[in-house]
Image: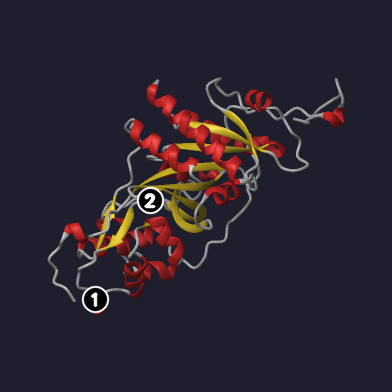
Amino acid sequence: MQAHDEFGPGGIRPVPPQRDVVGGYGEDTGSEEAGPLVRPYVIAQGRDHADTVQLDMISVVIAAKRAEVDEMELEPEQLRILELCRKPLSVAELSAHLDIPVAVVKVLLSDLLNRGLALARAPYQAKSPVSRDVLQAVLDGIQRL
Amino acid sequence: MASKDSDPGAEAPVPSALKILVAGGFGAGKTTLVGAVSEIAPLRTEEVMTEASYGVDDLSGVESKSTTTVALDFGRITINESLVLYLFGTPGQERFWFMWEELSEGALGAIVIADTRRLETCFAAVDFFERRGVPFVVAVNCFEGAHLYEPDEVREALSLNPEIPVVLCDARQRDSAKQVLLTLVNRVAESVNA
């Protein structure tokens, strides 16, 4: 590395800041804009987290292939979800594509899951020791990039 | 349309997902690194978080709530037909701790991007992952014209344990970002064996 040439041997270099125990880190960068908040909760018909199926941001969802969809019973956003989920997509991806907050996507989805119109797969739980096979698969997958 | 009878064999297999967090201060290169390895252009999701805040107006005796919108950029790597890996760029500021709790749940591991121009912006993330026992590596993003420090100097400044890998990277380059990911997954493998 040609890191410090400009300072020459024995020259003075700025000392990197040291980590202190707690608090007082970098400046806030203020992405404070909170967009319009009303609309999403109207879509979700005022429902709360309480009656939602346990869904994670990376739960993967796919539309049930053979279910009969009664379009009149669903929100337009739910129909969009079913359309997008012909291929498996995560809750986070749905949120990004539909531009609806993750929490609201979860509510819309749990309704679809309860109606049997979509299937969701819970994330791989990394909490328990991850199996060697999975780690090896991940390594191989990254190598192939 | 076909009847409701489900024929499980006919459904496409639904892959299971894993996630890796990419943390670092504003402008440290989180989204750049995610974009360098992701098979899709990084997506952005906005999460509306509610934080209860107490205090100020004690007269009412009612807690007030404040709402924050937090943007997360993420990318995706298909590992195989049954596994998908998501990379989430997580906001680096300390005030987002409440969000890291949720994000780090079940995460395979984390990459902390150190911007040597503002090394202090990654202190909070390092503290957090250490405390939570989330395996992590520190990637020193080498910006053009930025002061360059040796990995050992960064290690010392961050008071890192010797087993935590510190790697230099160029977050824009796929090969470089790949190396960071591989270092992390190897680190996870080590911590599983330990």
Q: What residue type is labelled 2?
A: Ile
Q: Do labels 2 and 1 share a chain?
A: yes
Query: Quick one: A49 or A131, which is closer to the camera?
Result: A131
> Which chain is indicated by disc 2?
A
Q: What residue type is labelled 1?
A: Glu
Residue A73: numbered disc? 1
Looking at the figure, which quarter contains the C terminus of chain B? top left
Tell me the CA gap for discs 2 and 1: 26 Å
Q: Which of marks 2 and 1 is in front?
A: 2
| B55 relative position to A128: left or right | right
User: Which residue shows up at 16% across the image and 73% down it?
Assistant: B2
> Nearer the N terminus, badge 2 or badge 1?
2
How does the figure colour the protein chain or chains?
Answer: secondary structure
Label 1 resides on the chain identified as A
Residue located beneath label 2 in the image? A58
Residue, x 23% and y 60% (percent of image)? B11
Q: Quadrant of residue A40?
A: bottom left
Q: Residue A82, percent across and down? A: 31, 68
Q: Is residue A100 visible?
A: yes
Tell me: B172 left or right of A9: left
Between residue A25 and residue B30, name the one nearer to us. B30
Q: Where is residue A112 in the image (x, y as percent from the top left)?
A: 26, 65
Identify whether A142 is placed above or below A43.
Answer: above
Q: What element carries label 2?
A: loop
Residue A130: give x, y in percent of width and height: 35, 33
Q: Position of residue B65 (x, y in %)?
A: 44, 54
The quarter holding residue A4 reads top right
Q: How crowded is mark 1: few (under 14 residues within 10 Å), some or many (20 or more)?
A: few
Q: In which quarter of the image is the N terminus of chain B?
A: bottom left
